[in-house]
Image (cartoon, grey):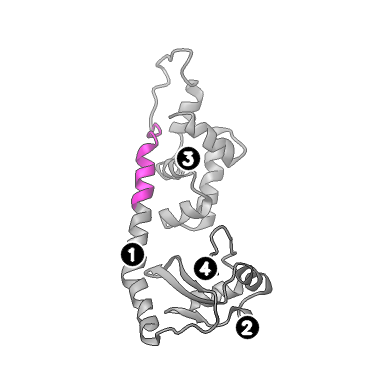
């Protein structure tokens, strides 16, 4: 019998079953997915459809910041879990895995940011450009961005979502949304997709 796998499946973070897992400090042991009351019908159905009968879910955090979930699935109910080992998994996740994964994500972000050419902070509008170079008007608009807006623009240009930008900069989603609106207004674009296209044209 093939082992269960949820690769390719997506689950909403607001699902009550997942929220219940996040409330646990240690590993959440679901001995029978078919009977788990915290799971919604769609979550239960998705897991059962790939053969998941039991599940061990471990929330991973960096301090108080959620990083992700580590899960192990079984194709039979009530597997023989070692209670002591399960209890120790929470400490391993919070003390080692969470900070390690957070550091890896930060390094990946910094590498992607380095690969993106720096956006100009100042441009001499009196200098003439060859006809093949981007119009001075756009460059001047970029120069009008604040340092904080330039930072957000660089991250968005790498393909990060609003939530990912907010997480990486440790800002609220509303702050990032406000800054992106300001950036779009200054650059004269109506959508974030057009903004990303414009910024990537400067590579």
| Of labels 4 and 3, the one closer to you | 4
User: Which residue lies at the image location 48% right of the left edge and 34% below the top edge?
Assistant: 199
Of residue 91 and residue 193, the one placed in the foreground of this image is: 91
Q: Earlier in the sequence, mark 2 or mark 1?
A: 2
Q: Are marks 3 and 1 in contact (CB under 8 Å)?
A: no
Q: Is residue 100 left or right of residue 194?
A: left
Q: Is residue 109 above or below residue 70?
A: above
Identify the image quadrant of the C terminus. top left
Which x, y percent locates residue 156? 48, 44
Q: What whole-number distance in Å separates the C-alpha atoms at marks 1 and 4?
A: 30 Å
Q: What whole-number distance in Å separates the C-alpha atoms at marks 4 and 2?
A: 20 Å
Q: What whole-number distance in Å separates the C-alpha atoms at marks 2 and 3?
A: 45 Å
Q: What residue is shown with label 3?
A: 157
| Of labels 3 and 1, the one closer to you | 1
Q: Earlier in the sequence, mark 2 or mark 3?
A: 2
Q: Is 110 inside the magenta-drawn segment?
A: yes
Classify mark 3: residues with Cα within 10 Å, few (<14), some (14-19) or many (20+).
Answer: many
Residue sitting farthest toward the right: 41
Q: Is 129 inside the magenta-drawn segment?
A: no
Which x, y percent locates residue 105? 38, 55
Residue 3: assigned label? 4
User: Which residue lies at the image location 50% right of the left edge and 27% below the top edge?
Assistant: 138
Residue 99: assigned label? 1
Classify mark 4: residues with Cα within 10 Å, few (<14), some (14-19) or many (20+).
Answer: few
Of residue 13 and residue 83, the one placed in the foreground of this image is: 83
Q: Earlier in the sequence, mark 4 or mark 3?
A: 4
| Of labels 1 and 4, the one closer to you | 4
Q: Earlier in the sequence, mark 4 or mark 2?
A: 4
Q: What residue is shown with label 2?
A: 35
Classify mark 1: residues with Cα within 10 Å, few (<14), some (14-19) or many (20+).
Answer: some
């Amino acid at each position: 019998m093939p082992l269960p796998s949820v690769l390719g499946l997506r689950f909403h973070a607001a699902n009550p079953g997942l929220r219940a897992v996040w409330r646990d400090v240690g590993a959440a042991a679901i001995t029978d997915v078919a009977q788990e009351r915290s799971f919604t019908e769609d979550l239960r159905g998705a897991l059962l459809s790939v053969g998941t009968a039991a599940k061990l879910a471990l929330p991973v955090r960096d301090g108080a910041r959620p990083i992700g979930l580590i899960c192990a699935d079984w194709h039979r109910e009530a597997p023989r879990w070692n209670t002591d080992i399960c209890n120790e998994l929470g400490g391993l996740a919070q003390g080692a895995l969470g900070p390690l994964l957070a550091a890896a994500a930060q390094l990946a972000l910094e590498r992607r940011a380095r690969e993106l050419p720096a956006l100009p902070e100042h441009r001499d509008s009196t200098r003439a450009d060859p006809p093949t170079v981007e119009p001075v008007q756009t460059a001047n608009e970029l120069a009008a961005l604040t340092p904080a807006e330039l930072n957000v623009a660089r991250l968005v240009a790498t393909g990060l979502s609003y939530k990912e930008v907010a997480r990486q900069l440790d800002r609220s989603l509303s702050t990032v949304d406000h800054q992106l609106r300001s950036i779009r207004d200054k650059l004269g674009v109506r959508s974030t997709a057009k903004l990303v296209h414009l910024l990537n044209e400067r590579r």
